Image: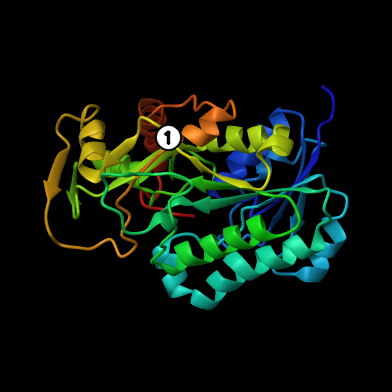
Amino acid sequence: MVKKEKVLLTGGSGYLGNVLTGHLLNEGYQVTCVDNLMYKQNSLFNFVSNPDFDFVYGDCRDKKLLEKIVSNKDVIIPLAAIVGMSACKMKPDEAKQINYEAIVELNKIRSKNQKLIFPTTNSGYGTKSGDVYCTEETPLEPISLYGQTKANAEKYLLENEKDAVTLRLATVFGISPRMRTDLLVNNFVLRALADGYVVLYEANFKRNYIHIKDVARCFQHCIENFSSMKNQTYNLGLEEANLSKLEMAEKIKEYFPKFEVVCKDIGEDLDKRNYIVSNKKIMSTGFKALFSLDDGIQELIKGYEILLKNNPYQNI
């Protein structure tokens, strides 16, 4: 196999980082992961025998470290982030440093000929009606600190003189060696298996979804089509999966007929994620998602049969 580009992933040991690392290695890329292993995870063990894999222990905010390892890379994918509204609320200073300031610093360090592909979030669309499609032209109105930091980083990169591609990710689902059980589809399947019921608030709030394997595939698509896609942002989700929480729970109920779905006004989504998203722009570049919600639910069921033998609600 012909060696492809050298890729640097910050946060390479995370939920998405693990899957992306494996995908890129399988496709012939040389991958270096930078991670501070804040969750004490060993999920990259599977790659250490691969000569195209390298691991660097460190923090994405360490300017001196990045200056040493960035220069000989062809592609930079900054995945390191404090993810989600709750986590950012708990660690606001770290969220600003990692989600925004570290991206600015990394962009300053890289050269103009190095590709940068940045994952942001479509939660930046903020409060919408759930009836009108959000496109890449829809103004961002992030409510949470998480959405604000990611939107600010995206704006900085797209207005910078160095080329970049940004992906506004839908809610990701699917199995990863560094599993996240808090993500909505992942969580609902776990609750169906472990509890047999779920209590929904704001059950009619809609959002878009995407399988983690398709996210990894899209990063590769961006690498290979960087010249035609650069300096633009793209929504990345399943076009057929703009579903409310209730619709998603009912979908999972198809696999668990006794799964009890209870709707109550007991909470509030402080991130106000109620929107439907158009993914036509990314599809116009030739990318097509391959993994459906059914694919994800079926693999989650198999995965949780293993996970439930340990701690069913681990998020590390």
Q: Please provide percent x and percent y for residue 152.
A: 55, 65
Question: Residue placed at 56% from the left, 72% from the top?
Answer: 96
Number of marks in the image?
Answer: 1
Q: Please give left or right for residue 4 compared with residue 129 in the image.
A: right
Amino acid, disc 1: Gly
Question: Residue placed at 65% from the left, 50% from the top?
Answer: 12
Q: Please provide percent x and percent y for residue 145.
A: 45, 69
Colouring method of the image: rainbow
Q: Please provide percent x and percent y for residue 226.
A: 71, 38
Other residues around mark 1 within 10 Å, as few (<14) / some (14–19) / many (≥20): some
Element type at mark 1? helix
The image quadrant that residue 252 belongs to is: top left
Q: Please give left or right for residue 272 compared with residue 64 in the image.
A: left
Q: Disc 1 marks which residue? A: 303
Q: Going by the picture, which residue comes out furthest to the top?
A: 1
Q: Is residue 287 above or below residue 263?
A: above
Q: Is residue 214 above or below residue 157?
A: above
Question: Residue placed at 58% from the left, 58% from the top?
Answer: 154
Q: Please give left or right for residue 250 compared with residue 236 in the image.
A: left
* Closer to the camera in the image, 275 or 14: 275
